[in-house]
Image (tube, coloured by chain):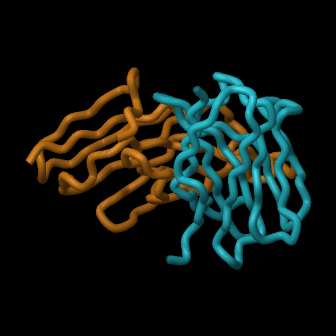
Amino acid sequence: GESVGLHLPTLSVQEGDNSIINCAYSNSASDYFIWYKQESGKGPQFIIDIRSNMDKRQGQRVTVLLNKTVKHLSLQIAATQPGDSAVYFCAEKGAGGTSYGKLTFGQGTILTVHP
Amino acid sequence: DTGVSQDPRHKITKRGQNVTFRCDPISEHNRLYWYRQTLGQGPEFLTYFQNEAQLEKSRLLSDRFSAERPKGSFSTLEIQRTEQGDSAMYLCASCQGGGGQPQHFGDGTRLSIL
């Protein structure tokens, strides 16, 4: 399979633990943020998004926190399962009409969940 | 399956050859994006279509690259005179409406240049 993430940050957790994946973004003008999960050989899969006028959003087993003061985004996964093992990317969208919604992706974090 | 579909999934070709990839977005999505991803990196933006109009191109998209979306539905990405550095995963994503909607990705085309 695809060998993604030769030099990516890694996070190893035990099944059932909570996981927190962090991301620093670069553009203070970004107004929309997304977390994606990417498994080997597949494209990024949408997990959860948040707009810049919010600081927290919850989904099923996942929570995204946004701290605009320090340009920091985090993804919390509750009761982590082996199927959550993947590379996780944060992405930001710049504000303004010329951005056309294109996403700028962060470095990515490899999450490994041990049974 | 009503997700984004990309074809082929894998392409191996010799340096100097031309290659073309196809993307079929989610049917009601008017926005279509191409990205490129190399090992250990996140996807990088290449180009964007709103319906059939190509509205933005990254400086990563050299003149050997061309993309089309002739009827505002499927899109093609062609690379002419391929080089070793073109080896990457080429991803297509689509979304509906304004920029505050999540982009949904296909599983990409992995290009390997011999």
Residue B58 lies in quadrant:
top right
* Residue at image point 50% right, 36% down: A72
Q: Colour of chain B?
A: cyan
- B56 and B82: which is toward the camera: B82
Res. A108 in view: yes
* Figure quadrant of the C terminus of chain B: top right
- Residue B6 placement (x, y as % from top left): 60, 59
Q: Residue furthest left?
A: A115
* Residue at image point 67% right, 67% down: B24
- B34 and A35: which is toward the camera: B34
- Residue A13 placement (x, y as % from top left): 17, 40
- B38 and A12: which is toward the camera: B38
- Picture layout, residue A31 above or below residue A7: below
Q: Judge from the rendering whether residue A23 lies leftward or rightward of residue B78; answer left or right.
A: left
* Residue at image point 41% right, 43% down: A88
Res. A70 in view: no
* Residue at image point 83% right, 62% down: B69
Q: Judge from the rendering whether residue A94 lies leftward or rightward of residue A92; answer left or right.
A: right
- Residue B82 placement (x, y as % from top left): 73, 30
- Residue B112 placement (x, y as % from top left): 56, 34
Q: Which chain is in orange here?
A: A
